[in-house]
Amino acid sequence: MTDGSARVIELQGTEEMKKDILPRLISRDPATAFTAGQWMTERPGGSDVSLTETTATPSNAKSKYGTAYSLNGFKWFSSATDSNISVALARTGTLEQGSRGLSLFLIPLRRPLFPSAADPLPTSTSNNIFVHRLKQKVGTKIVPTAELSLENTEGYLIGQQGQGVKSITPVLNITRLWSAIDSVGNLRKALATAASYARVRSIKSGTTLLSETPLHVEQLASVNVVYRALVHLTFHAIGLLGKVECGVASDEDAGRLRLLTPVAKAYTAEKSCTAMEEAMAAMGGAGYMEENGFGRSIRDALVEK
């Protein structure tokens, strides 16, 4: 989400956003780097953002980051609530306009966004953002996701008014490819663990290693084939994204990327879960212990589905 938010600001942010915020989103220095979340989902519509109820009205606040708005509403599934900023959809048009009445906003989670050197980091002053509860997710627990209410929260318009869904698309596409990488990476870890175990675990009264048993090798080989296929799919989509971002993609490339981005995310998660279960089973009872990491990897891939 930090990566996607950086791309949004790079493409559509104001000059001051590009000057102050973009360098922090792409920084690798923990002392200055920012992280970002994205808040779209609401109770009425879930993933159907056309039913978004959160409103944004121009405020009298002065900001160098562009037009300041006051946001009011409830975000039901708000990612990365420990981040520095978030990008969020809010309604600047009527409810009857559906998604065409939505705009995209940059929201600092705390104020001021850039405290002085003498102030604590991060500052404890909330931007009128109230956490109702953290979500008890099946996986990806290290990313705190919450139900939030925005009550006269200050935000700054990104892009054109009424173009919120189009403006936030880079965040969605980039996070989908990161999700695919996450699933493939977890599968690689599971496969490496199972293969390592096969090289030290013996059977037949300690006379034969699992790695020397054809049936066991066949099972691990089938997992390896799935892994390699998913790597090719994922990195083909990443390669297309690179071509599009560098302005060297053909119309065919751009169309293929648009098709493959959601497919890669869903398909890698789907197939990785099954393959990781095979790798887990290949270790017998030892595979089902939480300390080996299989359970967490499978749960995280399940969430990516």
Image (cartoon, rainbow, N blue to C red):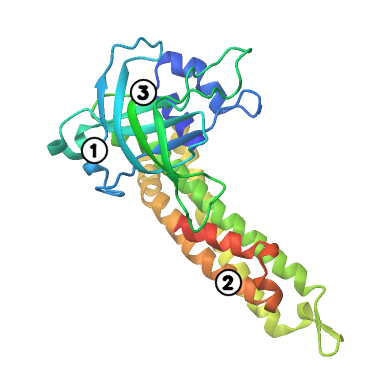
> Residue 68 at x, y = what percent?
33, 17
Q: Answer few, some or many: residues within 10 Å of disc 3's Cα (few below 14, many 20 plus, some between 14 and 19).
A: many
> Is disc 3 placed on a helix, strand or loop?
strand
Q: Residue at x 18, y 39 (%)?
A: 98
Residue 252 in sight here:
yes
What is the residue that sits farthest to the bottom in this orientation?
204
Q: Residue at x 48, y 47 (%)?
A: 177
Q: Is residue 205 above or below residue 140?
A: below
In the displayed structure, does residue 185 sit left or right of residue 201?
left
Q: Residue at x 70, y 63 (%)?
A: 291
Disc 2: which residue: 277
Q: Are marks 1 and 2 in contact (CB under 8 Å)?
A: no
> Is disc 2 placed on a helix, strand or loop?
helix
Residue 224 in which image quadrant: bottom right
Q: Are marks 3 and 2 in contact (CB under 8 Å)?
A: no
> Residue 278 at x, y = what percent?
60, 74
Q: Is residue 235 above or below residue 63?
A: below
Residue 99 in which image quadrant: top left
Amino acid type, label 3: Gly
In the displayed structure, does residue 97 sit left or right of residue 112?
left
Q: Quadrant of the C terminus?
A: bottom left
Q: Tag on residue 155?
A: 3
Q: Nearer the viewer, residue 20 or 146?
A: 146
Q: Earlier in the sequence, mark 1 or mark 2?
A: 1
> Is disc 1 placed on a helix, strand or loop?
loop
Q: Residue at x 32, y 15 (%)?
A: 67
Amino acid type, label 1: Glu
Disc 1: which residue: 53
Amino acid type, label 2: Glu
